[in-house]
Every structure is written in structure tokens, then in C-alpha cells.
Amino acid sequence: MARRSIPLMVLWTSLALAPSPPAPTAAAQDLSPPAADPSLLPYASTKDSVRLPDGRKFHLVCMGQGSPVVILSTGAADWSIDWNRVQPAVASKTRVCAWDRAGFGLSELPPQIQTVLDTTTDLQAALKAGGVDGPYVMVGMSIGAYESLILADREPAKVVGMVLLDPTVPDQANLERRTAPTLSAMGPRRDPFGTFLQTCIAALRVGTLKVGGPDPDGCWHPRSPPNWPPELVAAMDRHPESSSTEGILAALENTAAWTGGSETLKRDYKLIVKPNRTYGRMPIVVLSADERPNLPPNFPAAARAEVPRALAARQHAKQAYAALSTRGVYRVIPDSTHDMVQSTWLAVIDAIDEVVDEARAGR
């Protein structure tokens, strides 16, 4: 079971530094349901989907023509539709493919919970099966940066550029514990999506929630956003794991493994560490969210005092990504949130275009 998940903000940042919502306008107070969004239609199509060597169906969505091919990797617990604003624009310039990790979107579940090493192996196999040859420009959002780096490490001759969007940094959990222990400790306890998933998992395990029975919280029959086209709703409903309690339980457990504070992500934070990583003169652009604190008045004083130090450490760690190349560029995007593919997508498109142009020029 895949659902349109809450975009993952890394640990404490999700709540402590999230910007305040704007005051509702007259238009926002209109209770009429939004019309179906046609930009989401391509993500209902399985024409580019492939079979992996173990037989699993793996969902790719490709658009456009040209080289290099841009590969879009989402943040944790998100999937290809998160690129609906970015991908069509990039497709006017070159070939661009988004993908769904196993168990998300329209990709089938893996046999066991995966790490970023496993998801990158799936991606490599899928690109080969789909005939999506290099050279590649890797674009990674949040933890998608990890998969971008791992693929570049494994296939250096094929990766000719990189764009990292508010990337999760290597060994981030330890970094946050060292620089902001109080703030870091608050994160996992305040993850509403993770709490929701665990509630659903517990109900399925004890049998109080069953396929065909009442589902008041929408655990196994996700409530699709009202702007989803009917074709996308139907594609999601065709998931084979959605037809049995065992399949739904496995899908929820897979999703829970990719939410903030999970043991899987903590392991991934360490797996990506590679002290001697370098990419020579490869064009790299790193975009950082505009992390301006917006703390409630009752925010704990000890945690509040750690915010400046934590922000400085995170910015320094993200700048280190740009330093992997002699041509690396680091930019903070004003008014952006962690999910910048939705909050400031024009800046994302510009960065991808910039790296594609540099890769083509071979400068």
C-alpha cells in the first residue's frame, strides 16, 4: 500500500524549524474540492515500469529526449509524483526519469526492509532493464542525495553532474546528537506520521483492523488527495499487496522504516560515510532550504539555545557536498522549505538546467 505521504523533514527540523502557514485567504477558505491535477497523470502510467532480476515490478516515469539523462530521487517516504512540477519542465530540455523505491508509489514491495545501498542497487538494475543508459545527471532530494552519491561512486564514468536538494548529510544522526542533543532527542517522539503508522501496524497485528472491516483512520485504504486524477487513484488501488492483511501490514512496516527516527535511516546515515569521496571537476549544485527558526513561545529553553549551533553544523555539512568537486556550488534558496521541489520548484529547475548545460559543454 502506497500513499501520498507527509514529506519527510529530518528529525527535529520537521517541527522546530517549519515555517508558519500563511493566513488563509478568501480563496483558501473556498470549500469546493480542487479539480484533478493533470500534471499528476503521467505518474499513473506504467509504460516505463520494468521487472527487476528477482521479478519485482519497479516503477519508472520517463519524459523528454536527449542527453544527459536526469535521474530524480525523492526524499524518504515520498515517491515520483513529488516531481510533478519539476519533471515536465526538465523534459523540455533533456530526457528525465523519476522512480519509486520498492514499496512506494507503484513499485512492488521488497522481500525485506531496504537500506539506501539496496534502493540504489534497484535503481541501477531498473535503468539497465529499461534501457536508460548514461550519462546521468543525478538529482537527489533529502535522503535521495544518498542514492545519487552511491550511484556516482559505483558508476563514475556514467555520472556527469549532480544536483542535491536540501540533502541529508552523512552520519546526520550523530551530527545532530553532538551539536543539539536536546533538540535531536525531541524529534522521534514528535513524528505524527510515524505515530500514525505504528498505530495502524499494531491494530493489524492484533486483528482489530482487517481487510474488509471498518477502517476509521484510513490505514489500509488511504484517502487519496482530492486533486488526484481518477487514473492515479485506480493505479494505486491495483497494488497486489492491498488485497490482504499480510500485504498491507508489510507495506505499512516498509513505510514506517523510512520515516523520521527509524532504525533504517539511522543505519543509512552511517552507510553513506566515505571520507575519501571526491568527484574531480564534475558540476555539482547544492541547494539548501532557508532554515529560519519559527519556534513557538513554549518551546523548551534548552532546545531553543541549541538552534543556532545546530543550524550552523547542518549548513557546514551541506556545504561539504559542494566541496566534493572543484566546481561545486552551494546556495541557500530564500523562502524555501525542506520539500523544495514543491516550495521553490523554479529554483530547482534552474539548478538542473545549469548542470545539464555544463555537462553538455564538458567544461
Image: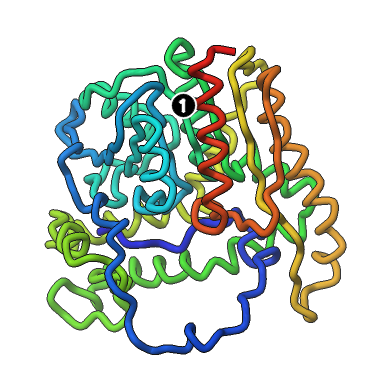
In the picture shown, does residue 294 fall above or below 111? below
Quadrant housing residue 198: bottom left
How is the protein colored in the picture?
A: rainbow
The number of discs equals 1
* Residue that appears at 70% across and 40% down: 331
Quadrant housing residue 142: top right
In the picture shown, does residue 182 fall above or below 143? below
Quadrant of the snapshot with the N terminus: bottom left
Q: Position of residue 157 (x, y in %)?
A: 45, 10
Q: Which of 354 and 221 lies nearest the eye of the viewer? A: 354
User: Helix or strand or loop: what does disc 1 sit on?
Assistant: strand
Q: Which of 151 and 171 lies nearest the eye of the viewer? A: 151
- Answer yes or no: is residue 111 visible: no
Q: Position of residue 162 (x, y in %)?
A: 54, 28
* Residue that appears at 39% across and 66% down: 197
Give the side of residue 256 with respect to residue 260, left or right: left
Q: Which of 241 and 207 lies nearest the eye of the viewer? A: 241
* Residue that appears at 47% across and 32% down: 147
In the picture shown, does residue 153 fall above or below 321? above
What is the three-letter code of the residue carrying label 1? Val
Q: Position of residue 154 (x, y in %)?
A: 45, 16
- Answer yes or no: is residue 334 visible: yes
Q: Which residue is mark 1?
A: 137
Quadrant housing residue 48: top left
* Residue that appears at 55% across and 58% down: 343
Give the side of residue 206 with respect to residue 78, left or right: left
Give the side of residue 6 with respect to residue 299, left or right: left
- Callout 1: few (<14), some (14-19), or many (20+) C-alpha neighbours within 10 Å? many
Q: Position of residue 282 (x, y in %)?
A: 59, 17
